Image (cartoon, grey):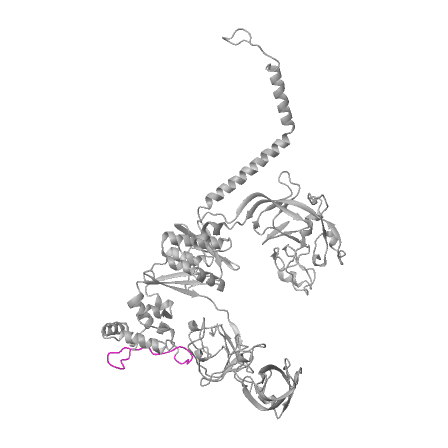
């Protein structure tokens, strides 16, 4: 080798000769390309790992924004280990056994006979897994990590799989339970292996009667295996592709800031998103209505401007389509006026196609906002009354002040409806009597009237009132209080809750909502919550039946039945008033089956039909519910006892009590307490009355056989047929 400047020859050895170099490189590449499958597998593994790291990186970036955060962590490949002993028959929800045919997954076929009434009713309907239909093919289930929420495909291996299962066809995932269309351990296409412990011993499991649903074919017999049969344990690994794993990302990143804890869901994400929006943008109309709508699962328009394309309903869902998004809601909600124009002429009614919808436009009537700027005098059409706490007024008020809209009370002939003649009556010089409904206590009415009749403000208030009178000379209290005090600093948000759960969730989070509202503005939250109608029958031997809500109102919203004829807002959360006005005998029968008491001077209460009967108006604070009894109480808890006619012989360890000169059938009743007041102060419940002189008790008296005077622990009315109402404590 000639190198310029270094002479004519460069010395070489066997290690530095070009022949040795070329031969060495050639053998290396020969070996490398000879095992190209290993190189390919290594490359694939590295690429899969890189893809997973990219997923994690993107999720970390998205977690910085509530609008972009992912509900589920995504795993490119996730192993699921399944043991043979863990597979069970799937517990499907069956139809009644009298059904002659069984459904299949997918569209239901034509009925093959007249007896197949299910197919006659459901022909062509597609039944999905988990619905109330029993498939011909049995399904199998195994428990997996409940954090695993979704995935499209399962394979028996990552590279070159031989068995691939598809969701909805070969398997289903439901709340931590993985269902298979067929038992994977019955197939030879899966790679399975036996399990051994650290000592090299074969792992086994033993069949027991409680494992009767074990799902392998060898067990599917009429009698099943013999109890105690030992089977070798096997295991397989299936690989979940693109698995969605719940890591509580919403709570960990955002919910914990506000103490709002809910399971990961789109609804929870929407609530958090609107909460953050309210905190960052401030209490704008869009922010407040958007937050309220999020509790109902309804969205306002999201983009700065959207164009309405269509609106329609399918089954139990409504859809609003714009040029940018599709919004959905339950058919419980109607389309808002911004989406659908209503008109008496059907030719003029319809979807407002092409309407421009700015951000924050309600598309459904789930949430409606009212103020005097957008809808002047809105309270005249949207409110029947306004209930204000006494704390809003100067003075020591005991309850609430109610300002009513007189337009709500037009039927003067119905004596059970709330009614009065709103008017200003100067019964004495310098005094104003403001018209309140009778449900406002007289003491609170006097405090309010004393305040407005004070010499320093009398003429000012009277001038305001006289300027507010209508043509008939009557005052509308609701309109008066809004026009003079609340018109410019109040608004109302009507929220149409579909379920009690939605209302409860909003009420739970309201503490946070309240901190975000402007301090200078009164916002009325109108909970529009439907109360299901129930059929309530009157107690004890009457045929009267009324269809009422739990607050006593009829389907038209009126309260006409005593003692329900009180304002519904007072019945929702307690007794109707401080005094229970009884217009006929009634029964209180809610969780009062152990109460036996009465109050002199206010009427008498007796136990009847697991409740209390009463006959007179009762101040509720005079009813003593503390006196109650149950077997095992000591004598100090026994209510006042009453002596009856005759004497009785109490037999030691005996359940039969014989009387002398007694009138058991007329003076006593089953459930009364026989009281040995004369000596041991014991009492026993009467379980059977055979005649005037023979009865049975639930447990025997202690002590020796003896004759005692007849006492009972509480008085009993002469007749048990007391008519009345079920009076619910809400």
On the rendered structure, is 659 left or right of 421? Answer: right
426 is within the stretch colored magenta: yes
The image position of residue 538, as x and y in percent, is 53, 79
The image position of residue 572, as x and y in percent, is 45, 71
For residue 365, above or below residue 83: below
Q: Main secondary structure of the magenta part?
A: loop
Residues rendered magenta in the picture: 412-432
Q: Residue at x 55, y 9 (%)?
A: 10
For residue 370, above or below residue 656: above
Q: Residue at x 66, y 56 (%)?
A: 135
Depth check, front residue: 483 or 265 = 265
On the rendered structure, is 609 left or right of 475? Answer: right
Q: Residue at x 54, y 50 (%)?
A: 246
In the image as oriented, which residue stretches furthest toward the top? 8
Depth check, front residue: 699 or 208 = 699
The image position of residue 480, as x and y in percent, is 30, 70
536 is within the stretch colored magenta: no
Depth check, front residue: 381 or 10 = 10
């Amino acid at each position: 080798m000639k190198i310029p400047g270094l002479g004519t020859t460069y010395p070489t050895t066997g290690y530095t000769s070009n022949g040795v170099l070329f031969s060495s490189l050639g053998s290396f590449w020969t070996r490398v390309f000879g095992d190209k499958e290993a190189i390919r597998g290594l490359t694939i593994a590295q690429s899969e790992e890189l893809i997973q790291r990219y997923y994690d990186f993107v999720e970390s970036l998205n977690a910085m924004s509530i609008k972009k955060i992912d509900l589920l962590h995504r795993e490119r490949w996730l192993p699921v280990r399944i043991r043979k002993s863990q597979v069970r028959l799937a517990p499907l929800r069956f139809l009644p056994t009298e059904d002659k045919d069984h459904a299949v997954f997918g569209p239901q076929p034509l009925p093959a006979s007249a007896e197949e009434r299910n197919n006659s009713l459901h022909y062509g309907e597609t039944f999905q897994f988990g619905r109330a239909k029993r498939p011909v093919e049995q399904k199998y289930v195994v428990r997996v990590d409940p954090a695993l929420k979704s995935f499209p495909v399962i394979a028996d291996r990552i590279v070159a799989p031989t068995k691939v299962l598809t969701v909805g066809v070969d398997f289903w995932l439901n709340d931590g339970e993985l269902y298979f269309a067929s038992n994977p351990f019955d197939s030879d296409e899966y790679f399975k292996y036996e399990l051994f412990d650290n000592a090299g011993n074969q792992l086994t499991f033993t069949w027991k009667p409680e494992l009767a649903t074990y799902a392998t074919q060898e067990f599917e017999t009429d009698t099943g295996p013999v109890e105690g049969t030992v089977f070798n344990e096997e295991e397989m690994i299936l690989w979940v592709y693109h698995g969605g794993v719940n890591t509580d990302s919403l709570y960990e990143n955002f919910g914990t800031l506000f103490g709002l804890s809910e399971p990961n869901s789109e609804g929870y994400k929407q609530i958090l998103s609107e909460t953050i929006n309210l905190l960052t943008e401030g209490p704008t109309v869009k922010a407040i209505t958007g937050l309220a709508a999020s509790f109902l699962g309804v969205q306002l328009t999201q983009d700065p401007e959207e164009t309405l394309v269509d609106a329609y309903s399918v089954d139990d869902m409504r859809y609003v389509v714009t040029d940018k998004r599709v919004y959905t809601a339950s058919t419980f909600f109607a389309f808002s006026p911004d989406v659908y124009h209503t008109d008496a002429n059907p030719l003029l009614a319809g979807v407002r196609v092409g309407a421009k919808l700015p951000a924050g436009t309600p598309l459904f009537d789930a949430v409606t906002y009212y103020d005097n700027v957008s809808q002047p005098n809105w309270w005249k059409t949207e409110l029947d009354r306004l209930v204000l706490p006494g704390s809003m007024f100067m003075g020591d008020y005991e309850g609430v002040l109610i300002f009513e809209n007189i337009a709500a009370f037009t039927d003067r002939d119905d004596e059970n409806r709330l009614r009065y003649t709103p008017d200003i009556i100067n019964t004495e010089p310098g005094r104003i009597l403001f018209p309140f409904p009778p449900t406002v206590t007289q003491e609170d009415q006097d405090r309010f009237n004393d305040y407005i009749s004070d010499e320093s403000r009398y003429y000012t208030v009277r001038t305001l009132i006289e300027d507010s009178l209508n043509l008939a000379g009557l005052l509308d209290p609701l309109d008066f209080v809004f026009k003079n005090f609340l018109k410019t600093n109040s608004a109302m948000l009507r929220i149409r809750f579909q379920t009690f759960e939605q209302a409860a969730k909003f009420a739970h989070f309201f503490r946070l909502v309240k901190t975000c509202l402007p301090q200078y503005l009164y916002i009325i939250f109108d909970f529009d919550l439907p109360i299901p109608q129930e059929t309530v029958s009157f107690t004890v031997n009457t045929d009267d039946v009324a269809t009422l809500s739990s607050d006593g109102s009829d389907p038209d919203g009126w309260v006409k039945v005593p003692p329900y004829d009180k304002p519904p807002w007072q019945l929702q959360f307690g007794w109707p008033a401080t005094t229970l006005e009884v217009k006929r005998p009634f029964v209180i029968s809610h969780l009062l089956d152990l109460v036996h008491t009465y109050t002199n001077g206010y009427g008498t209460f007796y136990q009847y039909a697991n409740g209390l009967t009463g006959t007179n108006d009762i101040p509720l604070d005079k009813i003593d519910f503390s006196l109650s009894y149950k077997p095992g109480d000591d004598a100090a808890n026994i209510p006042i006892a009453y002596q009856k006619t005759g004497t009785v012989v109490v037999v030691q360890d005996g359940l039969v009590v014989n009387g002398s000169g007694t009138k058991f059938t007329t003076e006593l009743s089953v459930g009364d307490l026989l009281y040995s007041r004369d000596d041991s102060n014991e009492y026993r419940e009467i379980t059977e009355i055979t005649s005037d002189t023979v009865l049975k008790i639930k447990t025997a008296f202690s002590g020796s056989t003896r004759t005692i005077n007849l006492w009972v622990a509480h008085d009993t009315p002469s007749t048990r047929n007391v008519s009345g109402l079920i009076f619910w404590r809400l």
